[in-house]
Image (spheres, rainbow, N blue to C red):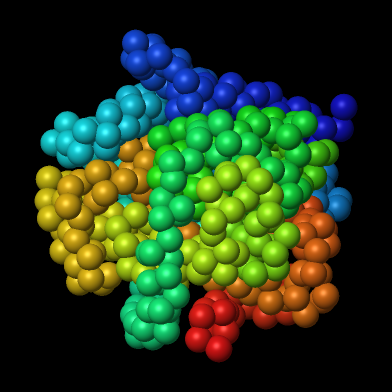
């Protein structure tokens, strides 16, 4: 066995532990009995500790040194570079903290789901306080020498971007989007009145028919159900267990058909990326996705640039009417007006593509403040409500539609939210490049273009280089803003 093969064998055995944890986490969110919560948290924390021990072991260090000295191809050099980076990251965080974070977030996610349903922030607060304390400690372990704990957490999701970089990005959007949203809302007043008057859009929609429709749309964009499945969860997510097992979830609302359809397109977009990664590299850093921003670009591209296009519903709307008889009373124009409706609302996952980044901005500002100690978690509901009123002009009636709506903080994912916004911008840039290449007329040709330029590239490049190679320019917001103006104001 060569030094490279020995290194990859060790990495893949470690990934088997992560695969087991991923399956347990998926089960936890989709069907685990509540009586199993404490034992499941223990099991997950044990797996995390063992995986951490392997990721910092002298054996791995020795394998890495041998493989690095023998590396002769660009892929071998890059693989060793990424393994070294992961090794140093794992070494920086104590095993005790890794284990405690996993146990804490495992329990907290179940408590969050109950608190959200009961609109009871007080029940979730002790868990949030503990997570913030632990994540602040983890961020301090990962922070660059002249950076903050929040910079350290951000680096887990988009390497190389610090708070100052995100401030510039969000600052530009905060200057542009409010006026743009107001102009679109004004333009849509007549169409929105027709949507509001259409009683057939208000359901009820049968749960089994909704799930069938979600599966059909996922297949229509290329999702392989021979290597995946769709289930229900409190918050939609996508999880790859291992090669050939890519799982997505959605949630249903008897009175709202669009929510499950677009969350399924979104999560299927994530899964398409995973299904397109090089099989021969699976279980290694090189064989993983580039970054969470790139991952989000794939989900947002299929959800918004494809799923909200007129061409998409020119094909799919007849299928929707067959599945839901009452939709026979709804014209395609009314339906597309609904799915393209721009309106400041309370729920991020159900928001339109124009206001979405404002939802993310609220979360970015608040999670940064909590990690840096500028906002006590107990003050989160009031701070959230004030931010929404100031930025979007709406105010939650209760915490279930306010600060309890997202799963991310209960799962310890501080630093994740900003990647949604960069992913939005990259989706526009990638779609524009695919369009210039003549690859957007068919879903299959678009998927093939993404496979070639994004999916099969795996983690050979960092985000700016990958995007420049695919589109011919560095990441930029101009294509996103141009898209909004073209779709909604032209």
User: In the rendered image of this protein, does residue 190 appear above or below residue 261?
Assistant: below
Q: Is residue 252 visible?
A: yes
Residue 466 locus on image (x, y percent): 69, 66
Residue 249 locus on image (x, y percent): 54, 37
Q: Nearer the viewer, residue 427 or 89?
A: 427
Q: Is residue 83 visible?
A: no
Quadrant in which the N terminus appears: top right
Quadrant in which the C terminus appears: bottom right
Q: Classify residue 395 by image quadrant.
A: bottom left
Q: What number of labels is visible?
A: 0
User: In the rendered image of this protein, does residue 388 appear above or below residue 236?
Assistant: below
Residue 148 locus on image (x, y percent): 31, 58
Q: Is residue 157 left or right of residue 431?
A: left
Taking the spot 57% from the left edge, 24% from the top edge, the residue there is 23
User: In the rendered image of this protein, does residue 489 appear above or below residue 169?
Assistant: below
Taking the spot 59% from the left edge, 53% from the top edge, the residue there is 328
Taking the spot 57% from the left edge, 64% from the top edge, the residue there is 331
Residue 190 locus on image (x, y percent): 41, 79
Q: Nearer the viewer, residue 463 or 364?
A: 364
Task: Specify the farthest residue to the front.
Answer: 329
Q: Classify residue 109 by image quadrant.
A: top left
Q: Is residue 325 left or right of residue 98?
A: right
Q: Is residue 430 left or right of residue 369?
A: right
């Amino acid at each position: 066995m060569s030094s490279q093969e020995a290194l990859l064998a060790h990495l893949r055995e470690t990934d088997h532990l992560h695969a087991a944890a991923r399956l347990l986490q998926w089960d936890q969110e989709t069907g685990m009995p509540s009586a199993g919560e404490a034992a499941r948290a223990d099991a997950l924390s044990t797996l995390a500790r063992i995986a951490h021990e392997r990721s910092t072991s002298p054996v791995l260090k020795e394998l890495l040194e041998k493989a690095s000295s023998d590396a002769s191809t660009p892929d071998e050099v890059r693989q060793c570079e990424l393994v070294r980076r992961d090794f140093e990251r794992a070494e920086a965080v104590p095993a005790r903290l890794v284990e405690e974070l996993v146990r804490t977030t495992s329990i907290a996610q179940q408590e969050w789901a109950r608190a959200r349903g009961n609109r009871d922030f007080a029940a979730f607060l002790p868990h949030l306080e503990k997570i913030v304390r632990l994540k602040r400690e983890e961020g301090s372990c990962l922070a660059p020498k002249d950076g903050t704990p929040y910079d350290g957490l951000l680096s887990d999701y988009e390497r190389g971007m610090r708070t100052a970089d995100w401030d510039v990005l969000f600052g530009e959007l905060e200057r542009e989007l409010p006026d743009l949203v107001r102009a679109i809302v004004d333009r849509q007043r007549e169409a929105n009145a027709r949507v509001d008057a259409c009683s057939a859009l208000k359901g009820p929609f049968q749960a089994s028919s909704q799930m069938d429709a979600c599966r059909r749309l996922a297949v229509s964009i290329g999702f392989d159900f021979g290597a995946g499945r769709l289930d229900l969860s409190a918050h939609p997510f996508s999880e790859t267990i291992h090669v050939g097992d890519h799982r997505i979830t959605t949630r249903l609302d008897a009175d709202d058909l669009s929510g499950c359809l677009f969350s399924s397109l979104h999560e299927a977009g994530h899964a398409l990326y995973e299904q397109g990664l090089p099989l021969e590299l699976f279980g290694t850093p090189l064989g993983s996705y580039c970054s969470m921003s790139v991952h989000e670009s794939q989900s947002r591209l299929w959800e918004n640039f494809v799923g909200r296009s007129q061409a998409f519903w020119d094909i799919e709307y007849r299928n929707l009417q067959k599945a839901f008889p009452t939709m026979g009373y709804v014209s395609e124009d009314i339906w597309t007006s609904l799915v393209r409706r721009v309106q400041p609302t309370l729920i991020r996952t159900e928001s339109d593509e124009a206001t979405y980044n404002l939802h993310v901005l609220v979360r970015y500002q608040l999670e940064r403040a909590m990690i840096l100690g500028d906002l006590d978690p107990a003050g989160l509901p009031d701070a959230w409500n004030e931010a929404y009123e100031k930025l979007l002009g709406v105010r939650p009636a209760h915490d279930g539609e306010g600060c309890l709506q997202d799963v991310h903080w209960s799962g310890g994912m501080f630093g994740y939210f900003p990647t949604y916004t960069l992913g939005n911008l990259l989706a526009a840039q990638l779609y524009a490049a695919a369009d210039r290449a003549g690859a957007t007329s068919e879903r299959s040709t678009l998927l093939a273009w993404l496979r070639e330029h994004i999916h099969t590239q795996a983690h050979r490049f960092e985000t700016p280089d990958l995007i420049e190679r695919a589109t011919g320019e560095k990441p930029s917001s101009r294509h996103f803003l141009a898209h909004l103006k073209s779709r909604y104001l032209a």
